[in-house]
Image (cartoon, coloured by chain):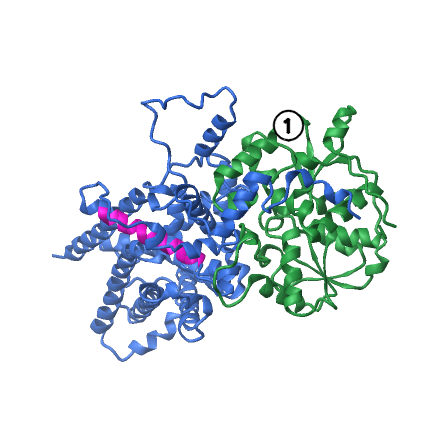
Chain colours: A green, B blue
């Protein structure tokens, strides 16, 4: 079942005189983090199955600058942005899909005023689009009736008002979508945003990811679904902290679909 | 000598309004200490927000109990203030219930004011219980001790007294109407105060007139005093909520401003034809300070935000850092900004219109580094604010100052930024390995 992934780069397509339908912005976590790489591969398998013409930047991709900007280093952010925009514009990129809400937010909202305007979608929006267009089908037998709760990534939900695409995909799996007490607009952060992923938390009474994981576990789910590699890490750690890793899995929406499709 | 009360009334009225106008002028001067920001865009969207969020209170009802009670008090105050118009005319010209000629409509108006007044009293009592008996967590954070706590209760007491005075005045008036007192035109409907009126039955007409007049005078003087209390109180929100919702952020919450001063520097750095050894232009303006360490570095909308905050604490109670025991409280960020701005304003007043450095600033003396670094930039506080205040933007501006002017980031973040600079990723991985995942099984 592990077919070889077809991952064309923009450079290869450009050399062949081709322009893909969409650029897949993999992001740093998706490229380097062992857990997030699985999400990246699951998403690519879906793209391959649906014969989506896409490409990645590969070694020409660099951090969007999001964590630098949120940490207060506007200078480094803009250096990264301007460099990335030069590459994206050189390849005449029109549409970008990414599985990271932080890259999504930065590319969509903060690049335009620096000269980089693209149609940017989150991978859950893109998958929803593929589904609507009949380019992928979802049987969902494997998840039928399973309790799944969805954790809204701040930079997808509150920051950009995307709440429905991931939920519709979960419903399409015939799973039972259960909501946490804080969801959608009032979803609680996983604790990773604003560059917190890369530092120790300030002293307090509890870690934010544990608090959020407790809210998720209150719904008695079999799966906690996420749409962000950082949320995924934070919640996975939270589940381990609560010693529930044998009964509760933390999975990205792309992984759920790939798994349902037996990809 | 009949017109002496009218003259006294006019003096009190104009003094009250004059003093208020003076404070508003000071308020506006302080807000303008902030940096310029263009808010001339999307007028229709802005008006829409003001009507929907400000007038319509759509975000108040996210928490239904507080929201509905608040709408009662809000409607009560707006509608009952129609009555103030009549009181002012009566006071200036010595008339009594000048709008009585409206007949049925007048009865309807007075009747609904009375019902609203009763509802306001009930709401205010419940609010007081929530603060002082139930002790809701969000009213007990450390920043709420001292004046903020007193302020919150004082407002409730003033509102309670004003409503009781209004009903007492009507009850005495109603009783006097029953007794065919001269000057007391039979007008109005008194669905609430008719139950207070029997208390006066045994009294002489002159005593009831004394009660009616006292309540009337105390009510209007109380309103003028309340108006002047606003500037010193969190209660300013009853005025500033409207401009604040108008000037609130329109772009997606996740979109943070790109600093133009930085863009210029970056463009210059990336420009291959720029001369790296060029001597700086002698007439060049002093480079702009990056980020904010004091209130003057913030934008004026952020300062308006600070004056608008009514310390309800919805932001803080939704904040993930605060919920897990960290120092950060978005409400405190807003309160600190206002306190510091007031301090700067007083400094300017005391020094003939010029700010004289006082060795203090917002960063460090009010807001600590620890608070700033605890933020996850999740926007929960921004979403929670019923009047479109953006505490997150102040936190981010202050982080910019810490990092770009002081290199004072936590060392973990310095590592992360070093990695981005060197490898194009926040972790120490080689950019040339970015596609390795595609070959791993």
Residue segment shown in magenta: B329-347
- Mark 1: which secondary structure? helix
User: Which residue is labeled 1 in the image?
Assistant: A89
Q: Which chain does tag 1 point to? A: A
Residue situated in front as seen by the camera: B114 or A134: A134
Residue situated in front as seen by the camera: B241 or B265: B265
Residue A104 position by quadrant: top right
Evaluate whether residue A155 shows in this view: yes
Report the magenta stretch's main SS: helix
Residue farthest to the right, as pictured: A1
The residue at 54%/41% (across/down) is B251
Q: Position of residue A77 (x, y in %)?
A: 53, 39
Evaluate whether residue B378 shows in this view: no
Residue B431 within the segment the image draws in magenta: no
Q: Position of residue B19 (x, y in %)?
A: 23, 50
Q: Position of residue B427 (x, y in %)?
A: 60, 47
The residue at 41%/54% (across/down) is B369
Residue farthest to the left, as pictured: B1
Q: Is residue B211 above or below residue A174?
A: below
Residue B346 within the segment the image draws in magenta: yes
Q: Position of residue B346 (x, y in %)?
A: 23, 49
Residue situated in front as seen by the camera: A69 or A112: A69
Count of labels shown?
A: 1
Q: Is residue A231 left or right of residue B221?
A: right
Quarter of the picture containing the N terminus of chain B is bottom left
Q: Is residue A21 left or right of residue B278?
A: right
The residue at 38%/46% (across/down) is B304
Residue farthest to the bottom, as pictured: B202
């Amino acid at each position: 079942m592990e077919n070889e992934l077809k991952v064309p780069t923009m450079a290869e397509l450009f050399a062949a005189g081709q322009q893909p339908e969409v650029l897949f912005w993999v992001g740093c976590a998706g490229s380097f983090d062992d857990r997030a790489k699985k999400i990246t591969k699951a998403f690519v398998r879906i793209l391959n199955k649906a014969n989506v013409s896409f490409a990645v930047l590969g070694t020409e991709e660099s951090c969007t600058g999001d964590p630098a900007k949120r940490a207060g280093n506007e200078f480094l952010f803009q250096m990264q942005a301007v460099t990335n925009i030069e590459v994206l514009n050189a390849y005449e990129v029109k549409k970008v899909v990414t599985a990271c809400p932080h890259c999504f937010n930065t590319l969509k909202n903060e690049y335009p005023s620096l000269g980089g305007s693209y149609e940017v979608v989150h991978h859950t929006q893109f998958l929803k689009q593929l589904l609507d267009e009949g380019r992928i089908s979802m049987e969902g037998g494997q998840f039928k009736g399973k309790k799944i709760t969805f954790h809204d990534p701040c930079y997808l939900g509150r920051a950009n008002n995307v709440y429905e695409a991931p939920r519709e995909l979960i419903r399409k799996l015939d799973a039972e979508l259960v909501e946490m007490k804080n969801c959608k607009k009032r979803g609680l952060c996983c604790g990773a945003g604003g560059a917190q992923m890369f530092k120790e938390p300030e002293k307090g009474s509890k870690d934010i990811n544990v608090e959020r994981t407790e809210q998720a576990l209150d719904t008695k789910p079999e799966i906690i679904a996420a749409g962000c590699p950082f949320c995924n890490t934070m919640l996975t750690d939270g589940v381990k902290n609560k010693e529930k890793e044998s009964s509760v899995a933390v999975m990205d929406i792309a992984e759920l679909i790939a798994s349902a499709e037996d990809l | 000598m009949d017109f002496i009360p009218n003259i006294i009334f006019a003096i009190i009225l104009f003094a009250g309004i004059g003093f208020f106008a003076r404070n508003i002028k000071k308020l506006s001067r302080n807000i303008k200490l902030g940096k310029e920001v263009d808010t001339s865009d999307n007028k229709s969207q802005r008006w829409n927000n003001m009507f929907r969020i400000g007038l319509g209170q759509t975000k108040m009802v996210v928490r239904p109990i507080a929201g509905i009670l608040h709408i009662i008090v809000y409607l009560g105050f707006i509608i009952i203030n129609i009555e103030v118009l009549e009181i002012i005319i009566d006071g200036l010209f010595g008339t009594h219930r000048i709008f009585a000629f409206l007949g049925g409509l007048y009865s309807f108006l007075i009747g609904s004011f009375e019902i609203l007044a009763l509802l306001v009293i009930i709401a205010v009592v419940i609010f007081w219980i929530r603060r002082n008996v139930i002790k809701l967590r969000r009213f007990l954070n450390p920043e709420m001790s001292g004046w903020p706590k007193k302020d919150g209760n004082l407002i409730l007491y003033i509102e309670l007294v004003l409503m009781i005075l209004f009903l007492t005045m009507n009850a005495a008036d109603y009783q006097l109407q029953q007794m065919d007192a001269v000057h007391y035109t039979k007008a109005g409907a008194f669905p609430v105060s008719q139950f207070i009126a029997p208390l006066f039955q045994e009294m002489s007409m002159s005593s009831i007139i004394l009660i009616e007049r006292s309540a009337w005078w105390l009510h209007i003087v109380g309103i003028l005093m309340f108006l002047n209390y606003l500037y010193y109180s969190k209660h300013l929100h009853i005025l500033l909520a409207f401009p604040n919702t108008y000037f609130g952020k329109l772009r997606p919450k996740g979109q943070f401003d790109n600093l133009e001063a930085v863009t210029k520097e970056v463009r210059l750095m990336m420009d291959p034809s720029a001369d790296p050894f060029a001597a700086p232009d002698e007439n060049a303006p002093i480079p702009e300070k990056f980020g904010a360490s004091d209130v003057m570095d913030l934008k004026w909308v952020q300062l308006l935000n600070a004056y608008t905050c009514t310390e309800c604490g919805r932001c803080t109670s939704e904040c993930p850092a605060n919920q897990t025991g960290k120092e950060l409280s978005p409400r405190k960020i807003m309160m600190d900004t206002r306190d510091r701005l007031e301090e700067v304003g007083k400094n300017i007043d005391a020094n003939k219109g010029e700010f004289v450095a006082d060795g203090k600033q917002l960063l460090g003396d009010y807001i600590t580094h620890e608070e700033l670094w605890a933020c996850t930039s999740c926007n929960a506080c921004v979403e929670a604010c019923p009047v479109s205040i953006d505490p997150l933007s102040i936190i981010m501006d202050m982080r910019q100052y810490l990092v770009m002017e002081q290199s004072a980031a936590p060392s973990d973040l310095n590592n992360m930024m070093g990695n981005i600079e060197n490898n194009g990723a926040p972790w120490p991985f080689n950019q040339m390995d970015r596609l390795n995942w595609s070959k791993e099984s």
